């Protein structure tokens, strides 16, 4: 599992651990798993799906920036 933070200018929308996260990249949908290679990319309008042990959290976004690091992922929307 890895940490996921989804934040707006006015606060945190989601913070928790996840098995995977699927995001709408500008070049297509991408899924991040634990130990993913570090990257920074732009996100387009679409849905973020965060998969946890027994549930999925879904978030609609208009755009954003994704950063993947050893600590987890951070999404600024």
Image: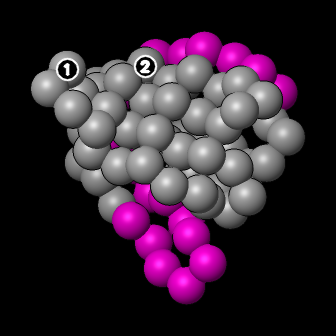
Tally of marks: 2
Instruction: Using the rendered image of the protein, determine whether residue 24 is visible from the camera's viewpoint.
Output: no
Residue at 46 percent across and 39 percent down: it is: 5
Residue 37, percent across and down?
Answer: 83, 27
Q: Of 12 and 46, which appears nearest the observer?
A: 12
Quadrant containing the C terminus in the rendered view: top left
Q: Residue furthest bottom?
A: 54
Q: Residue furthest left?
A: 10
Residue at 32 percent across and 32 percent down: it is: 7
Disc on res. 57:
none
Q: CA distance from mark 1 to mark 2?
A: 13 Å
Against 56, residue 6 (above or below) is: above
Against 13, residue 20 (above or below) is: below
Instruction: Using a 10 Å C-alpha cutoff, classify the residue at mark 1 as few (fewer than 14 neighbours), some (14 to 19) or many (20 or more).
Output: few
* Left or right, residue 68 beside residue 49: right
Q: Earlier in the sequence, mark 1 or mark 2?
A: 1
Residue 30 shown in magenta: no
Specify the principal SS of the magenta part: strand
Give, as a single range, the part of the protein colored magenta.
37-57
Task: Determine the secondary structure under disc 2.
Answer: strand
Q: Which residue is mark 1?
A: 9
Task: Determine the secondary structure under disc 1.
Answer: loop
Q: Of 5 and 22, which appears nearest the observer?
A: 5
Residue at 57 percent across and 22 percent down: it is: 67
Quadrant containing the N terminus in the rendered view: bottom right
Q: Which residue is mark 2?
A: 65
Residue 58, percent across and down?
Answer: 34, 61
- Dot in front, 1 or 2: 1
Instruction: Using the rendered image of the protein, determine whether residue 39 is visible from the camera's viewpoint.
Output: yes
């Amino acid at each position: 599992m890895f940490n996921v933070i989804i934040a707006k200018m006015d606060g945190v929308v989601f913070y928790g651990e996840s098995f995977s996260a699927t995001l709408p990249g500008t070049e297509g949908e991408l899924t991040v798993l634990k130990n993913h290679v570090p990257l920074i990319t732009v996100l387009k309008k679409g849905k973020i799906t965060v998969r946890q042990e027994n549930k999925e959290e879904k978030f609609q976004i208009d755009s954003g920036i994704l950063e993947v690091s050893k600590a987890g992922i951070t999404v600024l929307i």
